[in-house]
Image (tube, rainbow, N blue to C red):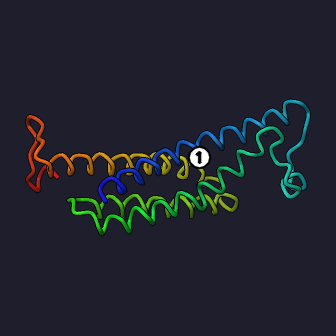
Amino acid sequence: MRKVFSALAWIIAGGVVVQAAAIAFAFGGVLNRVSEGGVVDKALLESGGAGGTGELGFWIHGIVGGVVIPLLGFALLVVSFFVRARGARLWAAITFGLIALQVTLGFSITDVPYLGLIHGANALAIVLAAVMSAFRMRRATRAGTGEHHEGATTDAVAA
């Protein structure tokens, strides 16, 4: 189960990287359209032709961020209850909580555009929490097999 936990955490971190790439691609397409004299307005957005070249980026960003990563975060949280490692539940809960906040912010941006600032920063927090989860699981796995690094400790203070 530790490998599953670690894999889910790394996939979540990778998913956020996909998110960043997809939205950059999407807005690059929008900027390209505008620079060539095109107009981005409500009619264009409602027609589904929002980005021209980068339109696929909006779809990827929406599906990965609105469905895939939340499901992976929930799976990480569920798996954390079957992993016998200190901090697994805590870091899975932190990661899932940040993902829930991210989804909420993402759907609220159209009403309050300034939330985009928090949305972007929170994405980095998700990557950090997911990577932390994976690293802590690796440390717990090494401690469980008897591998210790010089200066490593297993007491509660270091965890």
Q: Position of residue 56 (x, y in %)?
A: 75, 46
Nearest the viewer among 99 and 69 is 69
Q: Is residue 10 left or right of residue 116?
A: left
Density class for disc 1 (Cα within 10 Å; few <14, some 14-19, many ≥20) is many
- 40 versus 75 height, above or below: above
Q: Position of residue 45 (x, y in %)?
A: 84, 54
Q: Is residue 136 left or right of residue 146?
A: right
Q: Secondary structure beneath disc 1?
A: helix
Quarter-of-image position of residue 82: bottom left
Nearest the viewer among 131 and 2 is 2
Residue at the top extreme, as displayed: 36
Q: Which residue is mark 1?
A: 19
> How many callouts does the rendering have?
1
Q: Residue at x 58, y 42 (%)?
A: 20
Quarter-of-image position of residue 156: bottom left
Q: Residue at x 80, y 44 (%)?
A: 51
Quarter-of-image position of residue 36: top right
